Image: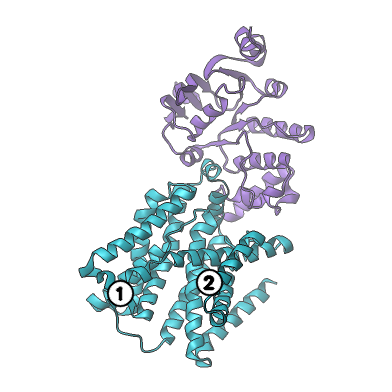
């Protein structure tokens, strides 16, 4: 069965690799959007799904990456790709600074601290006008072709999914789960929970940093409100919960299905599409608190490593 | 002198607000023996274990393990120095399998760790349930799993907090035999237990806490006849 899964995965990857040559720009753009949500939801999963520390401010790392990239491209003349990598490093550095004190907080206190971080960053980029353009934001040269972005975003999504698989099949991953299950017991069993939480937090911040960089390049204009919206964090949480937190493919499933669903509903019900989306989320949380994969895992005794 | 004892507590005190849970408690444990810790409910037994393992920070006094001070260390640092413990209320990782519960606490190479984990599961008769999620095991089985988990860290000093509670007689006999085997391997075992028969049969020396104070210590037969102990349990 395992070889079959790898064959299917290889087939899907080859299909996605050649897809831009056969489909319209609309489909490619939509695929970029799905890749972005996969990367964001899976990144959130790394800290919140595995360790149980629910972050309500993960878009802060996305915004940090976006602004770092935009500043480096517009003011220092960097190419978008290394600038995005630097966005990732900056987001990880921010996670290191913030994570050290904040990961000592438990439950809702951590969630609120992260929410606060996002608001602080949004205020800071609005305040330092000379550097960030303030409320007007930063405008970049529009992209000429979306294909490089398709491969770049797809590569990041693939990388974070693969990393999650490597983590969940390792003892590092088991230790992260043990923190979620009972942090005190994990600590008493010799697990350095503070260090492990910080490692997971750094990894979970680095990918939104790159994605934020790609987003800045793709949208060619960023400003504080559109770059640090709470809705982005909520969407990545919903996608992860819908697919199944603490799994590898749950966020992939959640991001893909909800993006498709949202696109279909948005086109047909322009004024009430968000209400329909909200109702679906309520139904999922009530009926499938462990998400789609969680239900399948329980019913068919599937391994946790899917 | 200190090196002769694997664990030494000197005037350890821990307060919670106005309540003194452990009051100037001193005791010494020699290696390779089984020790008991008894006392009425609320006498500070679990708090003392928490102070030793770093889960609570003592306010006064010294705690030394193999002659080195360990008070002030974080729990994982204490554990890595060679002290393992179980909890009064079971604290396994329910969404990890029985096997994973053991693998997660060791840093040795994977193949060796896997072999050792399977041996320990066999020791506690859980080998056929190795792939079962720990949360699906019965209370007694979870208790045994928790016991196996601390052995996985290969500690020299093992603190067991009420190991017999909720375990049926058959499993209990196996558990008690496993504890005796630990002593024969040179491990030191320190047990909190309310089942007097269990603790009197197992222990070579017993400490008695009352209101956080170490009011008596000695061999089981001496403790059973000690007036202060009888008074602590039954009153005058």
**Residue underneath mark 1:** A70
Secondary element under disc 1, as helix, strand or loop, is helix
- Please state if A207 lies on the left or on the right of A70 as rendered: right
The residue under the point 60% across, 52% down is: B112
Q: How many other residues sit within 10 Å of disc 2, few (<14), some (14-19) or many (≥20)?
A: some
Q: Position of residue A175 (x, y in %)?
A: 54, 52
- Decide if residue B224 is on the left or right side of residue A128: right
- State the hue of chain A: cyan
Residue B191 seen in the current view:
yes
Quarter holding the N terminus of chain A? bottom right
Residue A260 screen position, x and y as percent: 57, 78
The outermost residue toward the left is A130
Residue A169 seen in render: no
Quarter occupied by residue A168: bottom right
Visual hue assigned to chain B? purple
* Disc number placed over residue A109 in the picture, else none: none
In the current view of this chain or complex, which residue is farthest to the front? A271
Above or below — where is B17 with respect to A46? above
Q: Mark 1–mark 2 contact, CB under 8 Å?
A: no
Q: Which x, y percent locates residue A54?
A: 49, 55
Task: Mark 1 or mark 2: name the one nearer the start of the chain.
Answer: 1
Q: Which residue is nearer to you in this view: A56 or A8?
A: A56
Residue B63 quadrant: top left
Query: Residue tagged by mark 2?
Result: A274
- Please identify the quadrant where the C terminus of chain A is shown: bottom right
Q: Residue at x 48, y 41 (%)?
A: B76
- Residue sticking out furthest to the bottom: A22
On screen, residue B120 above or below A303: above
């Amino acid at each position: 069965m395992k070889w079959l899964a790898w064959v299917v995965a290889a087939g899907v990857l080859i299909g996605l690799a050649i897809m831009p040559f056969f489909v319209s720009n609309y489909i490619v753009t939509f695929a970029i959007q799905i890749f972005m949500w996969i990367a964001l939801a899976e990144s959130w999963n790394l800290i919140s799904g595995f360790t149980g520390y629910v972050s309500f401010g993960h878009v802060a790392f996305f915004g940090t990456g976006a602004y770092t990239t935009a500043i480096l491209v517009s003011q220092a003349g960097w190419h978008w790709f290394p600038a995005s990598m630097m966005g990732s490093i900056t987001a990880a550095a921010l996670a290191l600074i913030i994570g050290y004190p904040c990961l000592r907080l438990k439950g809702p206190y951590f969630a609120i601290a992260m929410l606060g971080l996002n608001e602080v960053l949004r205020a800071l980029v609005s305040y330092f006008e000379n550097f960030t353009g303030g409320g007007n934001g930063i405008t970049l040269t529009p992209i000429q072709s979306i294909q490089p972005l398709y491969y770049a975003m797809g590569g990041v999504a693939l990388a974070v999914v693969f990393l999650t698989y490597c983590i969940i099949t390792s003892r590092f991953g088991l230790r992260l789960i043990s923190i979620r299950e009972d942090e005190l017991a994990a600590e008493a069993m010799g697990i350095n929970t503070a260090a492990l939480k910080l490692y997971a937090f750094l990894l979970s911040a680095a990918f939104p940093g790159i994605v934020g960089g790609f987003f800045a390049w793709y949208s060619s204009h960023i400003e504080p409100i559109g770059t640090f919206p709470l809705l982005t964090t909520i969407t990545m949480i919903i996608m992860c919960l819908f697919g199944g937190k603490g799994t590898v493919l749950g966020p992939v499933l959640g991001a893909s299905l909800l993006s498709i669903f949202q696109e279909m509903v948005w086109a047909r019900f322009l004024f009430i599409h968000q209400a329909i989306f909200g109702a679906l989320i309520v139904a999922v949380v009530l009926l499938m608190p462990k998400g789609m994969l969680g239900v399948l895992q329980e019913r068919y005794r599937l391994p946790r490593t899917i | 002198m200190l090196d002769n004892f694997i664990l030494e507590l000197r005037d350890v005190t821990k307060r919670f607000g106005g309540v003194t849970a452990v009051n100037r408690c001193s005791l010494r444990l020699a290696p390779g023996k089984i020790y008991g810790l008894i006392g009425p409910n609320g006498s500070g037994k679990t708090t003392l274990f928490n102070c030793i393992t770093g889960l609570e920070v003592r306010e006064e006094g010294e705690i030394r393990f193999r002659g080195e001070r360990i008070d002030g260390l974080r729990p994982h640092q204490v554990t890595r120095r060679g002290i393992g413990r179980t909890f009064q209320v079971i604290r396994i990782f329910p969404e990890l399998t029985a096997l994973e519960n053991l693998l997660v606490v060791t840093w040795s190479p994977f193949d060796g760790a896997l072999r050792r984990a399977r041996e320990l599961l066999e020791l506690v008769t859980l080998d056929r349930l190795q792939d079962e999620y720990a949360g699906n095991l019965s209370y007694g089985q979870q208790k045994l799993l928790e016991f196996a988990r601390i052995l996985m860290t290969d500690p020299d000093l093992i603190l067991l907090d009420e190991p017999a509670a909720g375990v049926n007689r058959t499993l209990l006999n196996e558990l008690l035999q496993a504890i005796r085997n630990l002593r024969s391997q040179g491990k030191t075992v320190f047990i909190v237990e309310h089942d007097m028969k269990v603790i009197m049969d197992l222990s070579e020396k017993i400490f008695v806490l009352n209101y956080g104070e170490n009011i008596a210590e000695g061999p089981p037969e001496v403790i059973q006849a000690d007036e202060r102990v009888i008074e602590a349990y039954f009153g005058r």
